[in-house]
Amino acid sequence: MNNTEQSDASGVKSKPPRFLFVLIILTWCNTGLAIISSLFTLLIGKPSVEEIKQSKVVLATSMNQMLEIKMYYLASLMQKIQYLTDAMYDNFIGFHLVSLSVAAIGSVAALFMFQGKRLGFHLYIVYSLVYLAQTYLFVNPAFVPTEMLVINAFFAFIFILMYSRNLTFIK
């Protein structure tokens, strides 16, 4: 029996639902891009001090422009993004190794669900929670934009709900 097929009570083989297959492909696209991005970033290495300084100048200029036109919210958001970026550069290797590990967990979870293993669903829930929390390992929670957490939590919740609709296939 193929790993992607399940037998029901009468011994008839059933393929994974198309919706589950689409979710798994979307998860692999997301986690695959995260893995590739982390690997390339680790291979290329941390930007030079001059490049970091140049990006800070560009962001500071943008923040000043936002303040001039009284867009305080966007200026504040840009400032938090700068803190995130600084924390990422301060912990460059650790940050990207954690990102790589978290993406690998998500990819393995999708593989398990593709094989029809319920452990994959539970691992996907763990992946989603760790993905939401990974930024807090390196950044003070006061400097993490709430919008980032809310949007990521929303998509994680939606995907968990959609995966849960296919639990009848996953044994």
Image (spheres, helix red, strand yellow):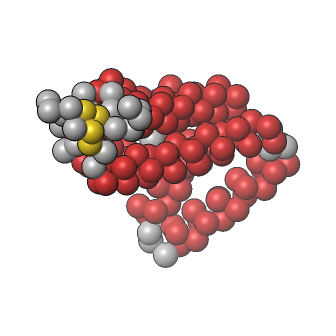
Q: Is residue 88 above or below residue 154?
A: above
Position in image of residue 88 (x %, y %): 63, 36
Judge by depth and name the residue closer to the eye, 64 or 128.
128
Q: Residue at x 29, y 27 (%)?
A: 118
Relative side of 94 to 10, left or right: right
Position in image of residue 50 (x %, y %): 85, 48
Relative side of 15 to 145, left or right: left
Q: Is residue 118 above or below residue 51?
A: above
Relative side of 15 to 47, left or right: left
For the N terminus, the quadrant is: top left
Relative side of 17 to 108, left or right: left
Judge by depth and name the residue closer to the eye, 9 or 26.
9
Position in image of residue 89 (x %, y %): 69, 37
The residue lying furthest to the left in this view is: 9
Judge by depth and name the residue closer to the eye, 115 or 139.
115
Mark yes or no: residue 75 visible.
Answer: yes
Q: Quadrant of residue 156?
A: top left
Total labels: the figure holds 0
Q: Residue at x 25, y 28 (%)?
A: 171
Judge by depth and name the residue closer to the eye, 20 or 4.
4
The residue lying furthest to the bottom in this view is: 69
Q: Residue at x 26, y 42 (%)?
A: 14
The residue lying furthest to the front in this view is: 11
Q: Residue at x 70, y 28 (%)?
A: 93
Mark yes or no: residue 133 visible.
Answer: no
Q: Is residue 7 above or below residue 36?
A: above
Position in image of residue 82 (x %, y %): 59, 48
